[in-house]
Image: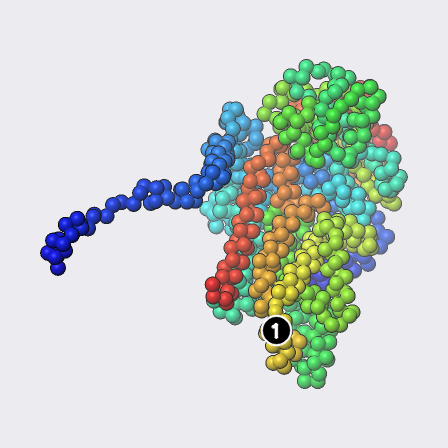
Amino acid sequence: MSDTHSNTAAYVRDTMIPQKAPPTGQVGAVRWLTENLFSGPVNTILTLLGVAAVYFLFVHLGPWFQNSIWNANSLAECREILDGASGACWGVIKDRWHQLLFGFYPQYTDPAIISALTGVDLATAKGWGDASVEAEKGFGVVFRYWRPSLTFILMVAALVPVLFDAIPRKALWFSAAFPFLAFWLLWGGSIWFPVFAMMGFAVGYIAFIALQRISSLAATVGAVLAPVIWWFFLAEPIGDAVASAIPISLVPIQSHDFGGFMISIIIGVTGIALSLPIGILLALGRQSDMPLVKWICVGFIEFIRGVPLITLLFTASLLLNYFLPPGTNFDIVLRVIIMVTLFAAAYMAEVIRGGFAALPRGQYEAADALGLDYWKSQRLILLPQVLKISIPGIVNTFIGLFKDTTLVVFIGILDPIGLSSAIRADSNWNGIFMELYAFIALCFFIFCFGMSRYSQYLEGKLKTDHH
Amino acid sequence: MNKTVFFGAMTAAVTLVAGAASATVLDEVKARGELNCGVSTGVNGFSAPDSAGEWQGFDVAVCRAVAAAVLGDPKKVKFVTTTGQTRFTALASGEIDMLARNTTWTLSRDADLKFTFAGVNYYDGQGFMINKAMGVSSAKELDGSTVCIQTGTTTELNLADYFKANNMTYEPVPIETNAEAQQQYLAGACDVYTTDASGLAATRATFADPENHALLPEIISKEPLGPLVAHGDDQWADIVRWTMNALVAAEELGITSANIEELSKGTANPEVDRMLGSSEDDLGAMFGLDKQWAKRAIAANGNYGEIFAANIGESTPIGLARGLNALWTQGGLQYSPPFR
């Protein structure tokens, strides 16, 4: 065959040409660059501008970070060390980070226990500025602020079963009990107060089960009334009796000592946890066929969405003081939590209503065709789909709510932003801006980015279409 | 959690209402064992938390002196942070017993908002700060300059009045906060920064190059700052007022935190003896306190001069001169009525 071939057509090549390397412009980094960065005049210009911006940032911020100073007790000291050069004075964070995190929450200062835990002898230490306390500052702060620290750890533990369904479902009982535990740990006082408050829900449940045999209406009424009777008339005398028999209590801490990220997280997490169920109810109410329910929900949503959050906060802080009798001390943090929750719930309701609107009509009809009643069709057919559609919007509202907690600075609550100005009012740190804001921004970023990543994970997990 | 706290707060509220009926502020404070004192969220030298969370400052010292006089312990103060918007409501609603927060004494605040000013602990006034490179030595030479000014404040009105009265023009650079003003001024967005002179001094102290900036000698407004209490309890107003007076009188009479123990054993000066409770007269009983009230108030932070020197005086970074706040015997305005 080869003979024939070579004889009949001498010009035909009988060997393969060795493979050449592809043109330099089509491989590796060069190809990637031309495809992604320099694919045309416009993109080339944009790329160059981008590089210039990064370079500019690096040139200006690089030395600032490189000259970072951690060991300084005042801005003046930083400036002395820097000697005219530009540099970040992180000494302020080192000096005040416990305040930025915990506000003025009283520190636990039993010298014996702190020494045992941290190995620093506090019996001889004079106070926060003392050298031996300095040495203990790092890890020891967790013990000094053991109540908020423990609450935070428990909060993470309580959130995990809610967020990830791989965790055994029984762990949800802990999540349900966590709010009461957190209240006790943070505010202190007798343990029986939150315990008896929690029992109210059990009382409601028992009443519901017991009365269900009679009628479902009686069960619902009983489930609402029984806890109210419990909380207002029974819990206090019984609670007092138990408390005097078995006194377990923590030192009570007042809300005005709360501050820093602690207050942001308390307001943010409570608001988030409560605004979702309230928002769902409002969204259902807005779609309801019952005119009274519908108009109450519409009125509430439109009113709350029609006023800025800061107005509601001022109402909480100022107007309520005028309405309530003089001498009344309605906890300010509680007032703020209520207002923030109502605000977020109104937005949440609209986000969820958007989810309902996106649901094809067939789903409603399918639920009806199955003969499910209203609550069952909502719970089993509609809401799971609606919530899935609404995830980006819901998380968006959560992130917005968490960041909006910084507005409490205007009513004199020292959140991180408020503390940054309080810290600046100290002569040692007056005139320091970027370092404090950078630290606060970093902390907020960690939380908000975490929420955003979780929502993407959840979206991916719940994806049922096949793209 | 919401429900628990809610019902807890409601019950607490109900009990408080029942208990609070018709008690005087003094009785309430004594029963509570703690003085609720409203302070700012942070003004350099006047009120600021230190790194241990203890409040320090010139206004804070007033709270501590009152707590020492009433409760016997300058530490028994709950500092409630208030903003410019929330301070008056907090006082009117009884959330705080007294307010010590750089508040200017004006007729409308006294009469319309129904507060009683217990005196003036700092005579302030609006001043100007310039970069020395401008080569200006008097506010009269500021014609045509750009001025950084906080919007919506009395300083804005004072500035307009002053320039109009002197037939000069200026270009305002509106700013929101002191922090923003510092940045704008240092960036050269305005030639002049104007606010209360104490604030200017505190601001200048934070600059990397304070020696290149100067405060002009003109003070164009009166800003008498002092603590205040709500109308309706004259006894309480008297206590706060006379605690302040005791601090001023102590400086005049030479009572300091160093020699107070020595002097309280008895002196040749009957007024000192009356103040420190070492004579027969029992001044404290006239408003429900004991004989040693003034002694404790002075011992808490020292006399007026000591408080001034420790927080905002010339040895501090803020470096304010006594000026109007010197004793009347030294050409200032601080003057206490007699303790008799």
Report in which chain the residue with disc 1 lies: A
Residue B154 visible in the current orientation: yes
Crowding at dot 1, Cα within 10 Å, few <14 / some 14-19 / many 20+, comes out as few
Question: Residue drawn at (57%, 30%), measured in percent from left and top?
Answer: A75
Q: Residue A173: percent from the left, percent from the top?
A: 56, 68
B253 or B143: nearer the viewer: B143
Q: Residue A41: percent from the left, percent from the top?
A: 47, 38
Which quarter of the rendered picture does the N terminus of chain A lie within? bottom left
Q: Residue furthest front?
A: A8
Horizontal side of residue B213 vs A87, given as left or right = right
- Figure coloring: rainbow
Residue type at mark 1? Gly
Horizontal side of residue A151 vs B163, given as left or right = left
A61 or B212: nearer the viewer: A61
B94 or A390: nearer the viewer: A390
Residue B255 visible in the current orientation: no
Q: Residue B249: percent from the left, percent from the top?
A: 79, 28
Q: Residue B85: percent from the left, percent from the top?
A: 76, 42
Residue under label 1: A362
Residue A383 sits in quarter: bottom right
B131 or A188: nearer the viewer: B131
Q: Secondary structure at mark 1?
A: helix
Question: Residue drawn at (40%, 42%), measured in percent from left and top?
Answer: A33
